[in-house]
Structure formats: structure tokens, C-alpha cells
Image (cartoon, helix red, strand yellow):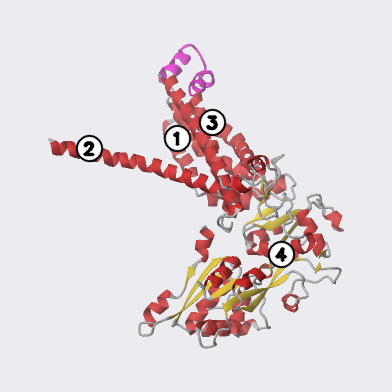
Amino acid sequence: MGKRLLCSILLGLLFLGLQAGARSPAELKLEGSTTVLPIAGRAAELFQALYPEIWVTIKGGGSSVGIAALINGTTDIANASRAMKPAELAKLPTAVEHAIAKDGIAIVVHPSNPIEGLTLEQIAEIYTDPSIRNWRELGGPDLPIVVVSRDTTSGTYGSFIELVIEPVKGKGAQLRPDIIYVGSNAEAVATVEGAEGAIGYIGLGYLKESLRPLPVSKGGGPYILPTARAVLSGSYPISRDLYMYTDGVPDPREPRGLWLDFIYSRTGQCVVLEQGFVAFYPIDLAVCEALFSALGSEFIKR
Amino acid sequence: MIRQAWRERSIRGLFFLAAATSIIILLLIMLFLFGEGLPLFRAYGLWDFLAGQFWAPTAEPPRFGLLPLLLGSLWVTFGALLLAVPLGLGAAIYIAELAPAGLRELLKALVEVLAAIPSVVYGFFALVIIVPWVKASFHLPIGKTALSASLVLGVMALPTIVSLAEDALTGVPRGFREAALALGATKWQTIWRVTVPAALSGISTAVILGAGRAIGETMTVLMVSGMAPIIPHSFLQPVRPLTATIAAEVGEAVWGSPHYHALFALGIVLFLLSLGINLLAEWLTSRYRGVKV
């Protein structure tokens, strides 16, 4: 409950109160995935500087909630960390998909762990089979395994299940009971940093030198490291697109069209980078800094 | 005359309303809790809930086994009492019986300060200090264990135990002590054979309310217990207490889904636990009043 409240941000009210006196302001409502929320929130800040006459409101709630709102006509744009399901598309055949960024999940271990890489199948086994207790069983050192996962409410947990567990174990597989659950990406990082035998997963943007990302292989393919390039090309197995859905193709002059153009612009993709996701085309960080400062903001490097 | 009687009555009514408000709120909370929790058992067996050994709300089919969570809660509370009872009782005896007057007031105030620290601060402290210490001392793969949670909960239960036990000890009539000393008992004999037994029901109340404090604590255990839903066998393994499970999962459990109702069912269990603890404490206190005369 608290989370949902936190996620519902109202932006730009002050700006508009002062400037839109004469014109009636256009409204743009976004709702949905909490994974997309930081991108949308930051983008709205900058968008507002460009288009003060457009009133942007953003809500979280999760991908399903956003898509339901789009179907019910209570939002202009649905944010989603997954593609619309056929059942949802049947209710709104005019929905248009806009992939706005790439997200990759890195499998991380303690830097002292010498294991070379894992297959998707091995990762799924580690997370579901409580009889795997030692790295030795996976060709690693003699070290007890500590399995770390995000809480079941997290978007990253959802994508980890969809991209790793379900393809191997089928839908609805039960995770092993002795998993250590943590509440945030940052806590996952701290937990894996502090335990030599730990394995965890985090969003690509949270990778640090104190952790070792593992190369991952799918279906007997090559072992691929989770780099932005590998996620972009789709060769890294644990990656996905993030979406914004609209009802029909928006006219480029109306708020939805202006918004999506902004997201696809270099500034928009810099926001994607800044928030720890992978942009659709390579951008130099110096360019991002210049673009942000032109809009009176600062590009924050992690 | 009539006007005054009317005024009396309206003031009386006002206070009755104030007293009734808390009861009404309690009833509403219970109504809501049971109304949202009981629908779970339309779709999920009561026995599967009460005796289930697995908590896997997102599996297909989901499993809502209470045992690992309930035992996790009881386990960390038990551990907390192992620490807090001897420490708290010792502190209470020192404050009530041995400390010089000036030091007594200072100590009482300092113990109260422990109660004023927000639980998230305790959790953060434990995460940074206790968790790595437990990991290193016991050569564990990870420090987020029942022991870490118990250590912090023990400290958090201390103020309750110390102040209530100290009250109980101070409440023992002076005559008891004087009689014991007059009979030639040493200070230690007086404390151990006379004062503590006389205050025993008050001390028991203190311990039970301390347990209530530990079992209801949420934020701290969420941060340090490791949150693994396994049935505890030792203090050196992670556990997932009831409270922390509700806190961690309520955010995005789909409204009206079995998972949502299951979290409220956990709430019912927690409510009944606290109710039982408070009734027990109430009962002990009433016995204590009898002794004091």
C-alpha cells in the first residue's frame, strides 16, 4: 500500500499553476510498471521544462494495472515491463506497442568466486533445487551456496522468474525455501558483496566493481557477459524490452506523440541510461551532460 | 438545577464516547481483518494453511503454509527472551534494590531512551554491525540469521522488561525486606528469596509484554532475518517472521487474490498471538494485585 502511494507521483503542478493561466493545459497520464517508473518520472521532469503547457501525471501500480487502465481508458500511456498478453490485446486491439528501453538482469557472485560461468539451466536449478548446497557441485570451489533473491513484489523478481526460471522449469515453479530475500537492488548488492558463497541477480544498472557478473549461456550457446552491447543485440539471454503502450498511433503534435518523440530523442535515451537501463543507440555521456544542463538539470553518473 | 444535570450528563456522554472510540476502532479492525482474511479458506484448505510447511505465494499453485513463518516469529522471539530476560531482570534488580538514588533515576531514564530509538535505526545498526559480526564469529556463509534478529530484538525488548520488572520490584512492600533483614538474611538472600518471589507475577508480566514487543516487531527483522521461509532448526540459519512477510509482500499482492487474503490470514494469526499475550499479561497483573495486599 505504502509502495503504491510512494509510486504515485504528481509532477509539474507548480510549473503549470504559474504559466498556464491563459491557455487550458493539456493533460498526459501515465500508469503502470514500477520498473519503468524511474525512467518516466525523470523524463517527465525534463519534458516539463520543454513543454510547460502539458500536465504530466505518473502512477505506478505494476504493468498489469497500467495495461488495465489503458483498456479502461483511464490512462493515456501504459508503462509495462512485459509485452501485452493476447487476452489483453483482445480487449484493446488498437493498442500500439512502443519499446522504449532495454533491461538486462545480471547474475552476480562474490568477486572471489572463480566459477567461469553458468548456463540458464544451472541458474534455474540453483534457485529451485534445495539439494544444491555447494559450488563444488557446479564445478566451482568448495564453498556453501547462499542464494539471494529480490522480494516477490519486485519487478526484477518478476522478470527473473519469466526469463530464467519459467523457460527451464515451466510456469509456476516453486523456488527453494532457503533463499535469502532482500528488498532492493542496493540490498542485493550489499548482501552478495558480504558473502563469499553468494549468488544473486540485479538490474544491469546496479553492477559495481565489488561484484562479479557471470557470463551466461542459453541452450548450449556461448557464455555471454551482461554488457550493454550484448543486451542491445539480444545475445545476452536474460534481457527484455520495456514498453509504453498507447491506444492507437498518436499524432506527433498531441501530448502523447510529443512525449514518445521525447523518449526516443537523445535526451530521453540519456534518461534511460541515467536510470540504469540500456539505451537503444549508443550515446556519449558528455552529450547527455550537455543535453541535461540545457534543460536546467544535471545528468547523474552512477 | 436541571441545566446542571444536563451538563453533567453531556460531559459524561462525551467521555463515554472517547472510551467507546477505541473499542469501536478495535472492533472495526477485527471486522476488517477477519473479513479480508477468512475468504482465503474458500479457495485454500484451513489445514493446509495451519500445517503447511511451504510459503510460496507466487508458485503455481501457490502454497500458503503458516508453519515456517509462525515458527520463525516464535523462534526469534524465544532467542530475544534468552538475551533480554537475564539482562533485563539483572538491570531491574540493580535499579530497584541496589543502585544509589541518583544513579537509579539516570539508569531508568537511559533505559527509556532505548525504547525511543526507531526500529529502522535498530535494523540499520544490526545490518552494519551485528550481521557481519555473526557471520565472522560463527564462520557462516551469511550473517542474516535468526541469531542476528534475536540479538537486536532482545535489546529492543529490554526497556519493556526493565521498566515493568523494576516497577514490580519497587512495589514490593518495604515490610517484606525489613522483616527478611531483621531475621538476619543477607542482602542477596533478601532479594533472591523474598523480593523477587513477591514480585514474580509482575516480573512475568514484564517478560510476556517484552515477548509481545519482540513478536510484533517488523522493520528490524525484515532487514536482518534473511527472510528465507524455512522451518527453523537452529539460530544460525535465516528465518522469515510473520510480520516481515506481511510487510514485504503486501505492496503488490493483487487486491482480492488468494495471496492478498493469505496475508490478512497471517494478520489474524498475529492478532490472536498479541491478544493471547496481552490477556495473559492482564491475568498475571490481576494476580499480582492480590499478592500486594
Residue at the far bottom in the pictured view: A253
Assess disc 2: are there few (<14), some (14-19) or many (≥20) residues with their C-alpha within 10 Å of its C-alpha. Answer: few
Pick the residue in front: A280 or B152: A280
| Residue occupying the point 57% across, 52% down | B247
Nearer the observer: mark 1 or 2; the answer is: 2
The image quadrant that residue A156 belongs to is bottom right
Assess disc 4: are there few (<14), some (14-19) or many (≥20) residues with their C-alpha within 10 Å of its C-alpha. Answer: some
| Residue occupying the point 78% across, 66% down | A214
Q: Is residue B5 magenta?
A: no
Reply above or below: A64 against B253.
Answer: below
Image mark 2: chain: B
Q: Which residue is mark 1?
A: B103
Secondary structure type for disc 3? helix
Q: Label 3 to label 4, Cα distance in Å? A: 52 Å
Nearer the observer: mark 1 or 4; the answer is: 4
Q: Which residue is mark 3?
A: B89
Q: Are marks 3 and 2 in contact (CB under 8 Å)?
A: no
Assess disc 1: are there few (<14), some (14-19) or many (≥20) residues with their C-alpha within 10 Å of its C-alpha. Answer: few
Secondary structure type for disc 1? helix
Mark found first going from the N terminus, 1 or 2: 2
Q: Which residue is mark 2?
A: B9
Q: Label 1 to label 4, Cα distance in Å? A: 61 Å
Q: Which residue is mark 4?
A: A162
Q: Are marks 1 and 4 on the same chain?
A: no
